[in-house]
Image (spheres, helix red, strand yellow):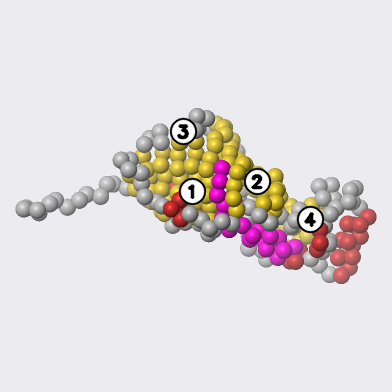
Amino acid sequence: MNRAAAAIFLALICSGCPKRIDFGPTGPITQAEELFRLTSASQDRVATLQGDGKLRLQSPQGSGTVSAYLAASRPGLLRVEMFDFFNRPIAVLVTDGQRFGLFQAQENKYYQGPATPRNLSRFLPIALPSEELVSVMLGKVPFIPAERMTLALDNEQGLYVLTLHRGSVAQVLHIHPKYLQVVRSEVRGAPAYGLEYDGFKEQGGVLFPHEVRLVASTADTSLGLRYTDITLNESPDLTLFDLSAPEDVPVVEVDEGGEALPPVSLPPASPGS
């Protein structure tokens, strides 16, 4: 943005706002690249999360809300336990970013294999790589690799609108002007999901969204996550990410596409053994 454009931008900020916008200690930002840099830094302040929440699914196949215990640590460590209304376990997903384990209580089976988006979608209705899913849960919006950026101001909502452009694809980011946190992300020109963050609260010196909504409009599906009692940036308990199958539960090994592999046949015992 050149000086003339910046002057126009500032003039619009000062004269065209229906309500006063609090830009925080940085003041109004007029350069798209600077806003992107500061927003990226604000997203990197949370590395681990652990605690309780509620998961809500809306899809053509049905809708519902369940209680959940969640533990996540960048880049790809994740554990999600689901419980029914009576606090009985429904399912447990664990991944270290490379492999996954999934216990399905109703089937009494433990699925394990590569942590591909297809395999993780056995547990969650939206197929994402584990590292991307962890980022979303930790309040970090994945950005497209931009070739250029443009910046505007939504006077009505009081938000920056930062658009990342790559060819015919654009990612539109609505950013809080004071806290420099993304509150909404939408990708246009390519199949992708949208993100919404809300319920920002200061916790441990970090402003963190306690409500996350992931929307896959092409599949008419959304996944909502509301944190109720969590801790941030504590040293992770690595035993939570143990991929060992529960005792006395049949194990089903699956391939990258989620197809069950044939059981491994043990060689016959040699005579006299």
Give, as a three-letter code, the residue at label 3.
Arg
Report how far apart the C-alphas of labels 4 and 3 lie in the structure. Answer: 43 Å
Report how far apart the C-alphas of labels 1 and 2 lie in the structure. Answer: 18 Å
**Closer to the N terminus: mark 4 or mark 3?**
3
**Closer to the N terminus: mark 2 or mark 4?**
4
**Closer to the N terminus: mark 3 or mark 1?**
1
Q: Residues within 10 Å of mark 2 (few under 14, many from 20)?
A: many
Q: Where are the magenta residues, as a range?
A: 35-52
Query: What residue is disc 4 on?
Result: 177
Give, as a three-letter code, the residue at label 2.
His
The residue closer to the viewer here, 171 or 211, is: 211
**What numbered label is drawn on residue 210?**
2
Q: Residues within 10 Å of mark 1 (few under 14, many from 20)?
A: many
Report how far apart the C-alphas of labels 3 and 1 lie in the structure. Answer: 17 Å
Mark 4 or mark 3, whichever is nearer to me: 3
Q: Secondary structure at mark 1?
A: strand
In the rendered view, tell whether residue 80 sits above or below residue 175.
above
Confirm whether residue 211 shows in the render.
yes
Report how far apart the C-alphas of labels 2 and 4 lie in the structure. Answer: 19 Å
**Closer to the N terminus: mark 4 or mark 1?**
1
In the rendered view, tell whether residue 128 sits above or below residue 34.
above
Query: What residue is disc 1 on?
Result: 79
**What numbered label is drawn on residue 98?**
none
Q: Residue furthest top?
A: 86
**What numbered label is drawn on residue 88?**
3
